Each structure stands twice: as C-alpha cells, then as structure tokens.
Image (tube, grey):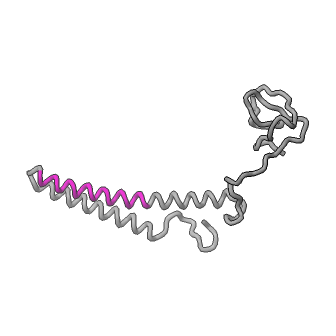
Amino acid sequence: MTGAGRRAEPWQDRDVLIVCGTTLAGFALIVTAWFGAGGTASVARQTAWLNLAVAGFAVSSIGLCLWLLRARRAVGDRRIALISLAPREEQEDPYEEKPLRRASSQHLVRAAGMVRLHRRDCPLLTGKDVTLAAAEDGELCGVCAP
C-alpha cells in the first residue's frame, strides 16, 4: 500500500466522510425519535417514533459496517502484498496439478499412520516413532522435501 499512488492508511477521505455522515444522520434520527416519543403518551404514536429510531440505528450501523469492510479489504491487500514474493501477474496457480515428486535419498523415514516420506529432521516428525522407508514407498513430504 505504500507503493507509488497508494496510501499508507486503510481509509480514504471519502470513507471517513461516509462514516461520519451516516453516524450523524443515524444519531439525528435517534434523537428526533427520542424527543418525539417523549412528548406522546399513546403507545401507538410511540411505536411510530420507535420505528424512526430503529431506522436511525440501521443507517448508522450500515455506515460503520462499510467503514470496517473497507479497512478489512485494505488489510487483506496489504497482507497479500507483504507475503507474495512475485508480482501478482506472475504468481503460479495454487490449484494447478503438479507432478508427484519421488524420493531419491536413502535416509527417508515414515511415522506410523503417515502416507508421505520425510527426512529425519522434518518438523512434522517431532516426538513420533519413525521407521526407515525405501524411496519407492511413496511421495515426499512438502515441508522437508529437498
């Protein structure tokens, strides 16, 4: 977000104006409904003022939700920009089928219940009993594969 043409803040000026405008409009409707309902003794008339207050709350809530969603989108874009090493156009498709890698080392192990082969120093084997496995017994682990 700090690149050329990008702002460091998650919100733009327009977003701040929208949240302030909707909050003030909702607050004005609630206050109007409060004073209107306070001057009437009839429950039927107070119900109409209550509807106005609920509408004011809805207007204010919608503005605040839009504001938070904009921030969430900006944070997500920032996270993607920080995590990715390649430009977005050059990134590989995570759902693309990749050929299976076969093991070639003689020092591979497998723990009970595991399908893939691991090197002895693989973090997925921490605290597990392992047995030696042949290179033809399966495919390599994605964490420790050389």
Quadrant position of the N terminus in the picture: bottom right
Q: Residue 77: horizontal and vertical position, in percent? A: 58, 61
Q: Number of marks in the image? A: 0
Q: Is residue 128 above or below residue 20?
A: above
Q: On the picture, is 130 further left or further right than 69?
A: right
Residue closest to the eye, 122 or 106: 106
Residue 45 among those drawn in magenta = yes
Q: Residue 101: horizontal and vertical position, in percent? A: 81, 46
Q: Residue 22: horizontal and vertical position, in percent? A: 34, 64
Residue closest to the eye, 35 or 68: 68
Q: On the picture, is 146 further left or further right than 68?
A: right
Residue closest to the eye, 63 or 98: 98
Secondary structure mostly seen in magenta is helix
Tell me which residue sits at (63%, 58%) in the image: 80
Quadrant position of the C terminus in the picture: top right
Farthest residue in the bottom direction?
5
Tell me which residue sits at (11%, 49%) in the image: 43
Farthest residue in the top direction?
129
Residue 127: image quadrant is top right
Q: Magenta segment range?
A: 44-66
Residue 60 among those drawn in magenta = yes
Tell me which residue sits at (64%, 61%) in the image: 81
Q: Residue 67: horizontal and vertical position, in percent? A: 44, 61
Farthest residue in the right direction?
106
Tell me which residue sits at (21%, 55%) in the image: 51
